[in-house]
Amino acid sequence: MTARRITRGLAVAVAVPSAFVLSTSPALATSSAGPVTVTNTETVQARLDPSGKVQGARVYEQLAFVGTGKVKLANPVSTDSLRNLDSFGGFSVKDGKMAVDLSVDGEQRIRTVSDFDKKKLPIKVSVTYTLNGKKLSKPSDVVGKKGRLEAHYVVENTSAKTEPVTITDGYGKQVVEEAEVVIPMVGQLTTVLPPEFGDVTSAEANKAGDGKGGTKLSFTATLFPPVGAAKAEFGWAAEVKDAIVPEAELTALPVSPLESPTFKTAVSGYQSGAEKGADLVEGGTTLDSNLLRLRDGAQKLLAGLLQLNAGAKTLNEGLANQAAPGAAKLSGGASKLADGMAELESGASVLRTKTGEAAKGANKLDKGASELRKGAKDLATGAGKLKTGTGKLASGLDQATGKAPALIDGLNQVSGGLKSVEDGLGQMYGGVGQLPAKAKPLHDGVAQLRAGIGSVGAEGTLLGGLEKLKKQLAASGPGIDKMRGGVHCAADALNAVSNGKPVGTYDEACYGAAAAQLNGPAGALNVGPETNPVKKMILDSVIAQMGSMGDPVPDLDKPLPDSAKLQVALAYLKGRLTQRAVPGIAQLQCGLDNRVSGCPRSEPGLMQGLAAVDAGVTQLVSGVVSTVQRGIGTSKDTPANKTLRGGVNGLQGGVGQIQAGGKTLLAGLNQLSDGADQLDTGAGALSEGTGKLQAGAGVLANGTGQLGTGLGLLAGGTGKLADGVGQAKSGSDQLAQGSKDLATGIGSAAEGSGKLADGLTTATEQAPAIPDGAGRLSKEGAKVLTKNGADTARDFGRRYGLLSAAADRAKTESMPFGAPEGAAGATAYSLKLAGATGEGDRSWIRLLAGLAVFGVAIGATGLFRRRVTS
């Protein structure tokens, strides 16, 4: 009998953790060893003192076989004090492995227990207590005290070891880093505080009643990074009188984060984050490359503008300093020539008049000869002036002709500079146009996020799932009401049984077929108080725990009191689901998308934020491209389009016109120089003729014998002379007006070239801002974007690499001894922390007091016997 009780106790001890492993471990799957599937579970139970120090540990092994056939395997076990939990038989053990050779038909199990003391537990617990703000040196100091008691638990995963972890950085390269990798575990610590503990608080625990007036606290810990941490800390506080240290139990399970549904979302998030970071790096790199191309094109534009500016300055200097003064001198000489020709024309007219009068009357010969001499003298003077003016005209035209080639060369340089500017602008226009395609991955990422949010009617989306959950919670109210009605009927029925009344006297519809069993003569509970008062007390206690339909429901915004009855708890549960959970889900839906029915349109949700981000990126990229390309313009633009290329095209056209005008000017100057040379030759001949005329007039004055003939010839000659002088005067007037127009045109050209030089100077001063801005955007924008993307990808890649390495350890090292080859395995750890109540000391006191009383009684008996004997 004693052996059976021990066996049953051990079976219960191993059954609970094993069932926990089988029901919660996602990594556990049956594995076939031939026609029979084999499952191996190892459950480690450790006993800890109240501070967390290990007092002893055992490992419970279970082999489960399902199928039909023979099985032969070697199971790694702890051989220290190895015992069979199913029978008194032993096992064959060799090299730390238990040999199993059996035939299976259906289901069969083998259970063992052995000591675990020689192995180190992969999880550690430590507990400290504080009373009224003062830390206690040992937990037993708590016993019997009064005040504010606080407990602080530290649970640590001690399985960490350093090993290489492979990660992918933001540039697509595989790198290896040394990191601390643990066997991933999740744990839950539970403890029950007695009813005497009041005002129980905890920032980390899930609280519930234990059904006996106590408070049950449950703490959950994810003991592996990066999802959690290798160490977790939590605790509770309570007002105590005659305090004790409550017992606690920590249950921990190794898990595989890559396979567990609980952690699959986090794992996929890290993996997706690394991929998105890499996409961001690629986009930033492409953007930086295009910005550098923009900077190079802008620098070429600046070089062209500098060349154009230099050519414009050369043109301005040639027009203002050389061509304009020469034209002014030409105009002055032509004006003097016109004045001399006017005087010559006047003298010729006087000569014609005088010689005519001489022909009419010989009596006026002396006076005419004198006037003829005077006119000849004046004619000689005018001819000299004409000679001087034509010489200056020829010199000015020679200077203008010499400077004209420099003007044409300057215009050629300006034309070449404008060609470089046009090439740079074309390259800049093409580089900027590639930006929209590089922004597409960002648009795709935003579209994926919006598709994941979905809508309330879309299956498999976040909003659709929330809508389904909201409807299911809203529909839970009638079911809970039905449960309350059933509990009410059950309470009435039990009340009838407790008071010895037939159940049938109440509403039979409440009970159904159970009424007959409760009311029948053989009913297990149909015993009145007069025959079994103990059962009546039990029934009354159960009825009291059920409560009444009319009991008031606590405030839904506060925790449910531990004293609440079942009826009130069901009503509280209904209210929390229908009045708090459903509105909360609706509010969460509004936060995701304000287009859901009932959401305020003035408060945008996450979906609207993503749409705004997508639109902002589109507007930013399209704005930059359109603004820059619009400012640059096309090769067909004119100055009326107000673009850079339109301005350059206008400058090129103007330079072409100036080049053509310069060539025409050069040809005209050459022709004008030739005419001036001929005019100078004619003026020389005229001067020589007037000298001869003056000599002839002297001969005329000295001799009158040939007066008639000479005067006739003189009258004809002076007539021709007057006509020639008139023609010469008309030509000199045209020359004066043309040279004046030439001086005015060259002055306007000089003024225009000065404005062109000033405008190009302003352009060259502003143009460096373009390559500088592109360089800053590359350095402070694209490169920063690339670095942040690389850092993000490396961080998420490191997290995913840690999870992957931890998952590998979970597969190979989670079991302390390991499963047989071909079998599936799982492990659970159960660490029980002892309490401290002071009962041991009280028991010793009672024992000593009893011994004292027993000794006194013996002494009194001996004394009585001696008296009777005497």
Image (cartoon, rainbow, N blue to C red):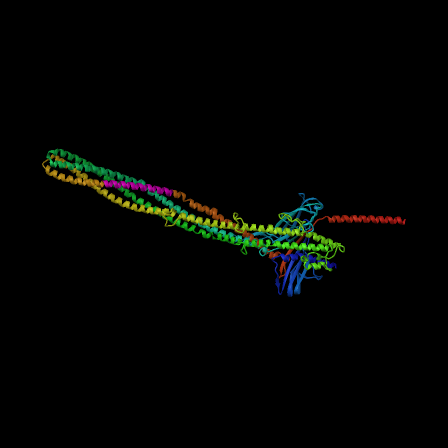
Q: Is residue 229 visible?
A: no
- Whole-percent x and y of residue 368? 14, 34
Count of numbered badges drawn on the protein? 0
Question: Going by the image, does 189 lie left or right of 732?
Answer: right
In the figure, 67 relative to 540: above or below? Answer: below
Work out whether residue 540 or residue 344 is closer to the camera in this orientation and state it: 540
> Most extreme residue toward the left, as rendered?
705
- Whole-percent x and y of residue 227? 58, 52
Does the magenta run of residues contain 589? no
Work out whether residue 441 or residue 862 is closer to the camera in this orientation and state it: 441
In the figure, 705 relative to 668: above or below? Answer: above
Work out whether residue 292 or residue 608 is closer to the camera in this orientation and state it: 608
- Whole-percent x and y of residue 421? 38, 47
Which residues fall within the magenta stretch?
Answer: 733-761
- Whole-percent x and y of residue 539? 72, 54
- Chief SS of the magenta region: helix
Give the quadrant of residue 79: bottom right
> Most extreme residue toward the right, as rendered?
870
Q: Is residue 307 visible?
A: yes
> Most extreme residue toward the bottom, as rendered?
69
Instruction: Report the quarter where the N terminus lies.
Output: bottom right
Give the quadrant of residue 506: bottom right
